[in-house]
Amino acid sequence: MSHTRDNWLTSLFRVWRREFYLVFHDLGVMLFFFALPLFYPIVYTLIYNPELIRDMPIAVVDHSRTAPSRELARMVDATDGLKVYQYAPDMEAARRMMNRKEVYGILEIPAGYARQLGRGEQANVTYYADVSLLLRYRQALFNLTDLQMAIATRHQQEKIASGGLLLQDIGGSPIDTQSVMMGDPTQGFASFIMPGVLVLILHQSLILGVAMLAGGSAERRRRNGGLDPMSVDAPASATLIGKTLCYTTIYTPMALYALHFVPWMFTLPHLDSMLDSLVYILPMTVAASMLGFCVASFVTEREASLMVVVFTSVVFLFLSGLTWPRYAMGPFWQLVGGFIPATWGIEGFIRLNSNGATFAQQSHPAMMLWGLAALYFAVAWILTRRFGLFAGVRRTSPRTA
């Protein structure tokens, strides 16, 4: 038994060493394992900076043409998110500016605006928004809502003061509300999306590299009559674990850089420690590697690995909960998303990194990652035993396996 164990460990070490050799002698795999994790996080974060939309141009159609309507336009222009690009003579001219993308919103002030305010009535102002990008709509909505509350408070004070009360005795509002944006205090898009995108970049680049290595092995087997001269003759379990140890060794510093130092460089939320990052790096790397081995059974050439990313990246992004919360998805899509390691990696890392949770509070995503690692290991082991995906000789039947 001791001799068998020694042989298994020796085989595992040989697989680990040979996999390092294959990785560092394959330019395509090195691009996926090193260039993507190094440069993609920086490029994506630079694209999303600045995080907030400032001075979004809008058109004003002032049918009132009075001092209160002009004051309203000046107040809109004074907000940090909106800028009065031009006064349009009518709605048709404003629509033409919006069609030409000169403005992204139209503020229409009715003719009776000043008269309604003077009578103490409710004045209605219409805003037409371009919702092709929800960030623009959100910025306009927040600014106009704050402006509406400020104007309403001022008119309330003036109305009450006209009855003989002192202005300093009048409160601004019966209820004072304050928004606290947990996990994204700046309300920036990069702070919201980038922590999850960083995890997905690591996940996809690892699967892509594993698939490309498998495609190279399949090509060598075809050229050599079913024999891959670069493979190591080892048990299936030693082959899978040895390869995974190689990928984990490579991806640990890459993941620390992407998940810990990139948020620090761009002042994104980063409340977790380096140890917390490592806790989620290990199970997600193992689970993603095992999933890559399963996907590799469909890869017969190196170029086919690119199709894996094309097919899975958008699907994984949507199912991860970054663009739409998982609790709002149907039971079927929640189940499908639960089989993707990136889903649990993103969920756990965001809560640690952005919300300051402890590992004890987020042990469930980590346990799910280890469970997926065990599941995909079993599937990859069966595929390796049955088809000899990573062995030196292609196995074509259970008898030869």
Image: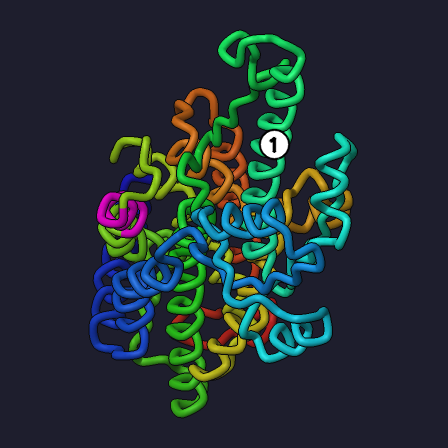
Residue 75's spot in the image, x, y percent?
A: 51, 46
> Is any atom of residue 80 visible in this view?
yes
Give whichever of 280, 2 is nearer the camera. 280
Q: Name the residue: 65% across, 57% down.
A: 65
Q: Name the residue: 29% across, 73% down.
A: 31
Q: Quadrant of residue 393?
A: bottom left
Q: Secondary structure at mark 1?
A: helix
Q: Which image quarter holds the N terminus? A: top left
Residue 288's spot in the image, x, y percent?
A: 45, 54
Give whichever of 237, 190 is nearer the camera. 190
Q: Residues within 10 Å of mark 1 (few under 14, many from 20)?
A: few
Give whichever of 8, 201 is nearer the camera. 201
Q: Which residue is mark 1?
A: 149
Is 301 left, or right, of 23 in this rendering? right
Is residue 262 magenta-colored? yes
**Bounds of the magenta segment:** 258-266
Q: Is residue 5 above or below residue 398?
A: above
Is 276 left, or right, of 347 in this rendering? left
Q: Name the residue: 23% across, 64% down.
A: 20
Residue 257's spot in the image, x, y percent?
A: 24, 50
> Is any atom of residue 375 visible in this view?
no
